[in-house]
Amino acid sequence: DNYNNNYYRNNNWLCLVVYGCFVIGTALFYRRLYRHQFLHGSFPMSVRARLSPGRSNVFGHGHKDILIRDVCIFAGLPVLYQILPIACSMYPRGKAGSLMALNMVYTTLVIGWSYRAFERWALDGCLPMKYILRNEKTSLTKIDAITMCLAAIFSPTAVLHFFTGFTLLAGYMHSRSMNS
């Protein structure tokens, strides 16, 4: 029993070190970008900028068209999200915790991310919002409150945040189930 306690303690330290290195590396990367004032204007690596010739500036190397590889990586981020939890907690311990909570984590993450990505590929053209606002030819100040609330409910950012809340809740439940 003492061996298992030391094993889990070492795993916890391993996870802490890996996550700490990730946080420090990310902070150093963005600090370098800040020093070069790379992100002080509009975001030069956005899909919108990369689809418009001459507008993007990818890491200071000028315009680069977006490639299928980049689209696949962006769309596959929910799958890539699974690698670190599996490698650092589930694989060494040999158990997955609550499968229902784990399925809820991945399902809500994929739904929210996919809806948000759906809007990204349409260049800020979310079809449900466009349908709700289809008869509104006037300025946004003259749209009635019900139409605006419906459009806000179906906004990609709102949907992503709604499902992210469930993702975090299910992630907490899953992490608690790993300890029992």
Image (cartoon, rainbow, N blue to C red):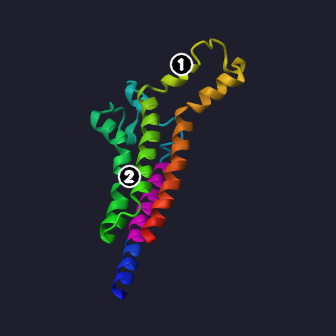
Q: Is residue 39 magenta?
A: no
**Nearer the observer, 179 or 100:** 100
Check disc 1: other Cα within 10 Å, few if <14, some if 14-19, many if 20+: few
Query: Which residue is under mark 2?
Result: 81
| Residue marked by disc 1 | 131
Looking at the picture, does residue 65 appear above or below residue 59? above
Rounded to the nearest angstrom, the CA distance separating label 2 from label 1 is 32 Å
Compared to residue 95, the image places residue 65 above or below, namely above
The quadrant of the picture occupied by the N terminus is bottom left
Residue ID at (67%, 20%): 140
Of 16 and 166, nearer the camera is 166
Q: Within the image, what quadrant is residue 154 found in?
A: top right
Q: As shown in the figure, which amino acid type bears the numbered disc 2?
A: Tyr
Give yes or no for residue 19 being in the magenta stretch.
yes
Q: Are marks 2 and 1 in contact (CB under 8 Å)?
A: no
Q: Which mark is residue 5?
A: none
